[in-house]
Amino acid sequence: MEKPFGEKPLVIVKIGGRAAGVEETLKDLVSDIAALKDRYCFFVVHGGGAEVSRITKIFGLEPVFRDGIRQTSAAEMDIVDMVLAGKMNTYLVRIFESCGVPAVGLSGCDGRFFMGESIDPASGNRTGRVTGLDMGVACVLARAGYIPLIASVSMDGHGRALNINADEAALEIACSAEAEALVYLSDIPGIMKDGKLLLRVGAADAEEEIGAGVITGGMIPKVRSSLDALKRGVGEVVIGGFTHRGDLDLLLKGGLGTAITGLKTVHYLENPWEAQGIVAESPQDLH
Ligand SMILES: Nc1ncnc2c1ncn2[C@@H]1O[C@H](COP(=O)(O)OP(=O)(O)O)[C@@H](O)[C@H]1O
Ligand SMILES: [Mg+2]
């Protein structure tokens, strides 16, 4: 049966704030997406956490994280809106359009794409979880040939702003749309342990590695979302980095990054980025 966004299999690409840091690399990613557009329908979800934290500190506030998830005060929510739905989203649309790939920026609020609720309403925390999705607006865009570029801010049923972790937003969209693949792009080659890349991480091992402090910070929501996505029927989940043209195809074919699987097997590789002389950068300004 044809899906509402067209007959091609859907791939959700989540671009981490840090992965979006180098403009030339981002353009290479867009050219990969353009090259694969006939084969897949792409939805792009983006974060921007490093930039949110940078601006938050300029305003004299201290970002607070729990299990890698930002705990968003009302004041910080304004910054999240400005950075994600404003700066980052527009920046990405400019990059896609300047590469000749039609794209439209959206947030969870648009057409109620994804609605949510606060994870802790009593405390005034504006961090949310997704409670419902309406794929309508994204499907209209996809069928018209646009790639939806989605900022992970939204609102609750009363119209109050919510900040939703972009890894979780990508997961919910992937599950709701029965995506063929969910790709998490960040500033690392995949899940690392003792300086080596884990080629595959099994569900049973993942929580253990979180408990042991091997998987920390922003990698936690990625791993937990990946496991959830597999359980809920997404075909394939991979966490990795993008450094060269052609990497997206490799990530989709299992030739790059860390695949999250139901298998227990875990293989190791020396850090492939180190061998290429690539060092994961600390958070930096986007442009
Ligand atoms: N075992 C691990 N392997 C790889 N990265 C890890 C691991 N544990 C923690 N991290 C951190 O997770 C970060 C990616 O998550 P995050 O900072 O939220 O970026 P993004 O913007 O891509 O979501 C990496 O930059 C790395 O510092
Ligand atoms: Mg993150």
Image (cartoon, grey):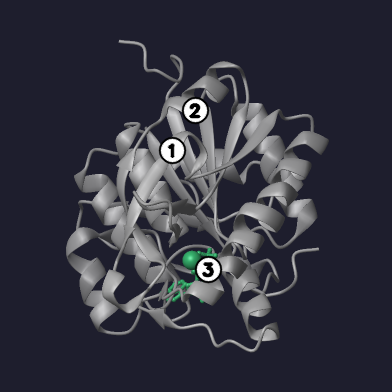
Q: Return the residue nearer the eye: 256 or 207.
A: 207
Question: Could you tell which of marks 2 and 3 lies nearer the N-terminus?
Answer: 3
The residues tagged by marks 2 and 1 sit, at their Cα atoms, a distance apart of 7 Å
Secondary structure beneath dot 3 equals helix
Q: Residue furthest front?
A: 158
Question: Could you tell which of marks 2 and 1 lies nearer the N-terminus?
Answer: 1
Judging by the rendered image, the residue that carries numbered circle 2 is 137
The residue type indicated by label 2 comes to Val
Circle 1 residues within 10 Å: few <14, some 14–19, many ≥20 = some
The answer to whether marks 2 and 1 mark residues whose Cβ atoms lie closer than 8 Å is yes
Residue 166 in view = yes
Q: Return the residue nearer the eye: 120 or 157.
A: 157
* Residue appearing at x 47%, y 33% in the figure: 111
Q: Which mark is residue 214?
A: none
Q: Residue furthest top?
A: 1
Q: Return the residue nearer the eye: 57 or 99.
A: 57
The percent coordinates of residue 26 (x first, y second) are 71, 50
Judging by the rendered image, the residue that carries numbered circle 3 is 77
Judging by the rendered image, the residue that carries numbered circle 1 is 113
